[in-house]
Every structure is written in structure tokens, then in C-alpha cells.
Image (cartoon, rainbow, N blue to C red):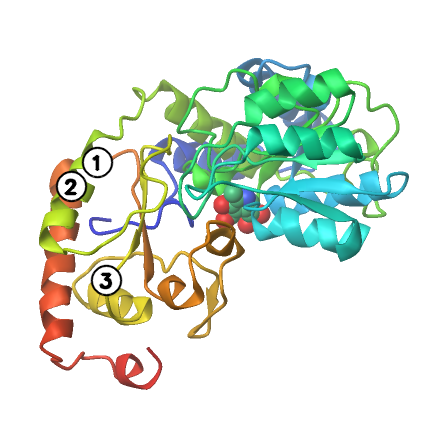
Amino acid sequence: MPGYFDHNATTPLSDAARQAWSEAQARHWQNPSSLYASAGAVRRLLEEAREAFAERLDCEPERIVFNSGATEGANLVMAHTARTGQRVAISAVEHPCVRDAAWKWFGAGQVLELPVDIEGRLDLENAMTMIQAEPPALVAVMAANNETGVIQPWQEMARFCHEQQIPFLCDAVQWIGKQPLEAIDRCSWVSISAHKFGGPKGIGILVIPEEQRWPLALQAGGPQESGHRGGTENYPAIAAMLAALEEALDHSPWSGDARDQFENRLRKIIPGIRIPGRNTPRLPNTSMAVMPHGKNLKWLIRLSELGFAVSTGSACSAGKSNPSHVMAAMQIDSEAMGRVLRFSSGAATTLEEWYSLAAALGEVQTALQHGSRSRNQLDFNQA
Ligand code: PLP
């Protein structure tokens, strides 16, 4: 879909994933736990898929647990750790699925927040000092931030936690499919969602610690996934997730050139625009901008009318946007937060598409400055 710049929210199903899913639905739809031959074939395929993921992620197949995605994964890790642990440390920019799960399972008072710098990158030295001062039962640092694209020092933190013998959770949702997989196996826990790299929604992986012997079993139910996650396995979705991952990894490495050229152009077209995180390593597909004027919802609606799908960067539902803890951690004030837009491209997005987006932003800027009316009433009433 040209004009789609919200790949960090979700990606369209890749052709390879669609084909793998259709084939599995047509031929391998049986319950892998049933005892007849056709179900046994599905069980074998499921285990082969587990081995293929393990090989890609460079870990033992026993560490791969299929689930519905990163939200479920984070909740499982937090609930499991809170059974015996007292405190958890998380970076100040974690996705709500980690942040809110930490609060829910440990209690807000037991969640130590590790600060980030002005660019939104974890302050590693400070974080290590805080952790050493009072070692928590778990440390969670995401691989790359969904709002800013800023790459976190998760490998360094994984190594440090390993030395300190503290379990480490890495939310690798935005990393997988865009960056190399090395070092993933150094984390105790890793959470992954297929729909961020061309797979279906509602399917993902939790990589569990090597030494995890007892079933995690957060939800009561059947003995699937070695007792770690009850519920009939969704083999067609797993097959599609594998096809999507292989396609994403075989794709030539992403370069951030097109995004950078877009930002350079944008800074000329829209003087006064700010791009937080620009001076630190970021995912090659993400650009978060603080517009110089006008509420972000106004921009978003007008861009949508011009055929562009972008995000406001902060949680936004039913026309209301909540202040973003990520931007607050980067010391962006609440007024400026209301002017933030996030653009995130996909593997097939071209430089021309980035330039078209820049031109559309220029058009919206002119329209907003002249106060011309949007076709959408929402613009007047809510933005
Ligand atoms: N972690 C990050 C960094 C994300 O961007 C998302 C989705 O937006 C999630 C976790 C949650 O993934 P899901 O909604 O698939 O559970």
C-alpha cells in the first residue's frame, strides 16, 4: 500500500507468509495433539518449525515457546518472576506491554525505572549502578523503541545481567526482521510478534531461559508447548510466521538512507521541525518528528485525506491521545508531545515514497497555515 508509513504499528502479510498460511490451512489444519496420522504430520511440521526458529535465533529448540505475541510474553515473564522476586528494573521507554505488566505483577512501588538520555537511549552507566545498588529479580530493556526507533544498548545490558546473574528480558519486537539476529540467545527471555515483520497478527514467540525446567503455565489448560503455554497450537500461523521471518532475514540489510534523505528534505520544507533521537543509532525505518505547530491529529487527518497513513507516536484511541511516557522520559513537554508524528516504513518502501510523504507534509503545512478547512469534521471538533 503506497503511502503506508505505520509499519511499526503493524505490517501487511508478506506474500510468502500468505502462501505458507493458505497451504497449512488447506493441508495441515488438524490438531497437532490428536493421535491419527494426519495430526501426527502437523505435530512433526510444528516441531520442524520450532527447530527452524531455534536455528535462526541460535538457541535450543526447547527455548522456543509459541504464543500470541509480545504482550502475552511480557505478562508471562513478569507473572512468573513476581512469584519469587520482589523488584523489577525496566527501561523508562519500554512498550506498555512490559511497563504495565511490570506494574501489574510487581506493584508500581516495586518497579525501578532505568533512565534514558535526551535522545531516548538507555543511560547504561547509570542503569548498571542502579542495578548493582539493589539487584532486582529481572531487568527488561527493549532492543529498539517503537515510537522513536532508537536502538537500546540491550546487548551490553544482556552481558551485564549475565555477569550479575540477573535474568534479562529483551522485547525484540521492533528489532526482528530489521536488524541482525546475533546475540539474541544471550538474553534469558526474548519476546517477538510476527505481525511486525510480515507475519500474521496474534502469533509470536517467547524465548525462555535455557535452565527453565518447570512449566511456566500462567494460564491453566492443556499441556501444549511443554506445559509452558496451554491452548491448541496455531500451526498455520506459525508456518506463516516462519515464512515471513525467513523472507525478512533474506532481504538485503536495511539502510536508513531513504529515511535520512526524507528528514533532510523535511527540515527544509518545514523549518522549526525537530527530530528527537536523530543523533543516536536508530532503526533504519523510523522517524519521529515534533511538528513546529498544529496538533498532531490535525496533521494525521489531513495526511490521511492525501492517502498517507502515519501515527501520532503516542497511544491514541477513540480520538484521545494519552501522554507518551517515552517522550516524557526524553523530556519532551506535554504541549510538544501533542505535535509529534511518527513515520515508519517497510522493507519495500522507496525513496520516492518517502519524498511523496515529505511533499504531502509540506502541503498540509500550507493548508494549516492558511486555515483551510479539512474535509473531515473530526479535524475541527477534536484535533
Ligand atoms: N513491544 C513493542 C516494542 C511493540 O512495538 C509492540 C506492538 O506495538 C509490542 C511490544 C506488543 O506486541 P503485540 O501487540 O503483538 O503483543
Identified by mark 2, the residue type is: Asn
Q: Nearer the viewer, residue 293 or 155?
A: 293
**In 3D space, how far apart are the residues under numbered discs 1 and 3 (Cα atoms)?**
19 Å
Q: Nearer the viewer, residue 263 or 333?
A: 333
Numbered disc 1: secondary structure:
helix
Q: Are marks 1 and 3 in contact (CB under 8 Å)?
A: no
**In 3D space, how far apart are the residues under numbered discs 2 and 1 (Cα atoms)?**
6 Å
On screen, residue 248 above or below 183: below
State which quadrant residue 44 falls in.
top right
Residue 206 visible? The answer is no
The local crowd at label 2, few if under 14, some if 14 to 19, many if 20 or more residues have their Cα within 10 Å, is few
Please tell me which residue is depicted at 28% across the width and 49% down the height of the picture. 5
Identified by mark 1, the residue type is: Asp
Residue 131 visible? The answer is yes
Marking on residue 292: 3
Residue 295, image x and y in percent? 30, 71
On screen, residue 198 above or below 301: above
Determine whether the beta carbon of the residue marked 1 sits less than 8 angstroms from the nearest atom of ligand 1: no
Residue 306, image x and y in percent? 16, 63
Residue that carries the numbered disc 1 in the rendered image: 260
Q: Is residue 167 left or right of residue 38?
A: right
Q: Earlier in the sequence, mark 3 or mark 2?
A: 2
Residue that carries the numbered disc 2 in the rendered image: 264
Please tell me which residue is depicted at 44% across the width and 44% down the height of the picture. 118
Numbered disc 2: secondary structure:
helix
Q: Is residue 44 left or right of residue 104?
A: left
The local crowd at label 1, few if under 14, some if 14 to 19, many if 20 or more residues have their Cα within 10 Å, is some
Q: Earlier in the sequence, mark 1 or mark 3?
A: 1
Q: Are marks 2 and 1 in contact (CB under 8 Å)?
A: yes
